[in-house]
Image (cartoon, rainbow, N blue to C red):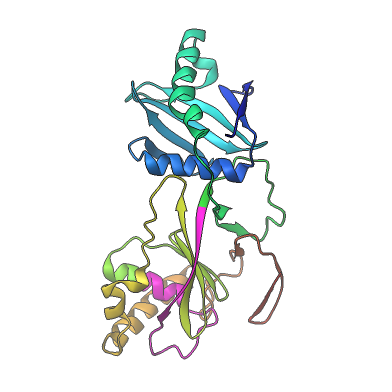
Amino acid sequence: MTGCFIGAGTHGKIKSYYFNCSTKDIVSKVDQFLLDNPSYYDEVLEDFGWVYITLPPENNKFGFKIGGNSEITLIAVGNENQVTTWNTELSSSEKESFTENFEKEFIQRLYSITPKSVDYSKKPFILTINKNPSNNPWPHYVIKYDTLISYPLPKEFDSLSFDYFEDLIISFAQFTDKEISVNQYYNLFRINKDISGYITDSIYVTSLYRVIGQNLNSKIIFNQKEWGDYITEEAKNTRLTDYNKLREIKIGKNYKSTDVYSDMSEEYWMVEHKEIIKTVGNNIYIK
């Protein structure tokens, strides 16, 4: 059984709970607890990586974060259907009541959960400009699943190092009236923060991601019927028209006519924690 130590919070923290296990194991415990109790799960505040849950019997709302020195820190609390409040806004009796609920219905129940071997990442895509991301902040943890599923590209592409793949996805999004975001660096891509992969003569999805506590629901557009219809030879003229419309818009915004990125706003990023050490022409070298 994994135990924990309790420490008083500072800088607005209500209370911290220090565990005798790794942060990775805490992530696994919390993830399993929320998967087993889906009615407790609320959301993750993505900007900070805070996890929100509602707990019986009063259905109070709690916001906490995982990280630091193997700890869970309670940040915000609130009554049902009310905005959560901070440490400085709580009376001593309110703080005692909320923390008792949090400890009994959540912290104490984590002890009996055996952590699983999970592969997790901090926000799966880290910009290359951040060469040495710190482990000290409270990151937005996601559970990562490795895979390698391939999908065909339209016939107008014999191969695709980096040009136009983003345009292809955006065109499909507009054609189907879907909300799809894509970011690309050379042949690496990410879509909707749910999946990532690379492209050569085909599209290869290498990883799927889900937020702690959420069931895996990666929506891979490439296995949808609408995508299959859009990349047929019969739809080629439609695609070419869509590409040209997007290209005209980008040129109007000072993008180069033949490149995906503008001169001043390239987004450099990488999958996981691999560091791009240099690029030569269209070749990318990763360590």
Q: Position of residue 98 (x, y in %)?
A: 45, 18
Numbered range of the magenta stretch: 143-171
- For residue 165: magenta? yes
In this picture, is 143 found above or below 29?
A: below
Q: Quadrant of residue 178?
A: bottom left
Q: Position of residue 147 (x, y in %)?
A: 48, 69
In this picture, is 159 found above or below 38?
A: below
Residue displayed at 40% across by 48% down = 214
Q: Nearer the viewer, residue 70 or 224?
A: 70
Residue displayed at 26% across by 89% down = 234
Is 14 on the left-hand or right-hand side of 102?
Answer: right
- For residue 225: magenta? no
Residue displayed at 36% across by 38% down = 37
Residue displayed at 44% across by 59% down = 194
Q: Residue furthest front?
A: 1
Residue 254 in view, yes or no: no
Q: Nearer the viewer, residue 91 or 99?
A: 99
Is 187 on the left-hand or right-hand side of 287?
Answer: left
Q: Position of residue 87 (x, y in %)?
A: 54, 19
